[in-house]
């Protein structure tokens, strides 16, 4: 039987996994200026199933943080994070 809650949980987990793959590839940046490109890359990878020659739905989850958690910061007036 169709379980909408289960499907939503699985989809959310897969988006987070793809976001972690993208975040790791970018070197876990802290600068918000790269956020739009990371979102675009995650969306593209989610739609196509591929990011930088990695089949994201079959790849191992790298774990760690994603850009989704708001961990990106703007540099201060001296360019530091």
Image: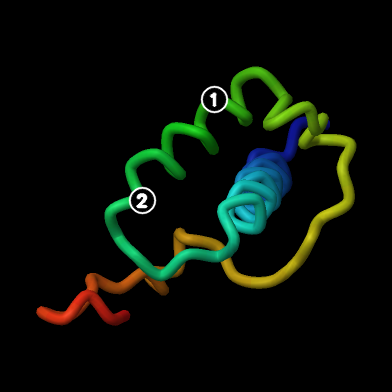
**Which SS class for mark 2?**
helix
Write down the residue under mark 2.
35
Image position, residue 78 (x, y; %): 16, 81
Indicate which disc residue 44 carries: 1
Q: Is residue 49 above or below residue 79?
A: above
Please tell me which residue lies in front, 24 or 3. 24
Q: Residue furthest top?
A: 48
Q: Which mark is residue 74?
A: none
Q: Are marks 1 and 2 in contact (CB under 8 Å)?
A: no
Residue found at the very far left of the displayed protein: 77
Residue drawn at x 72%, y 25% is 50
The residue positioned 70% from the left and 31% from the top of the image is 52
| Residue 12 coordinates in the image, percent (x, y) | 61, 48
Number of labels in the image equals 2
Residue drawn at point x = 62 percent, y = 29 percent: 45
Coordinates of residue 4 in the picture (x, y in percent): 65, 39
* Element under disc 1: helix
Quadrant position of the N terminus in the picture: top right
Q: What x and y, as percent, mark residue 56?
A: 77, 36
Give the side of residue 1 with respect to residue 11, left or right: right
**Disc number lying in front (1 or 2):** 2
Residue neighbourhood size for the residue with mark 2, other residues' Cα within 10 Å, grouped as few (<14), some (14–19), many (≥20) = some
- Earlier residue among tags 1 and 2: 2
Residue at (45, 44) in percent of width and height: 38
Q: How is the protein colored in the picture?
A: rainbow
């Amino acid at each position: 039987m169709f379980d909408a809650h289960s499907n939503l949980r699985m989809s959310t987990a897969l988006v987070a996994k793809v976001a972690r793959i993208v975040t790791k590839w970018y070197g876990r940046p802290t600068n918000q200026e790269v956020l739009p490109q990371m979102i675009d890359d995650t969306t593209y990878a989610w739609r196509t199933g591929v990011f930088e020659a990695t089949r994201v739905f079959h790849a191992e989850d790298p774990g760690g943080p994603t850009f989704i958690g708001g961990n990106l910061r703007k540099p201060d007036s001296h360019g530091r994070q």
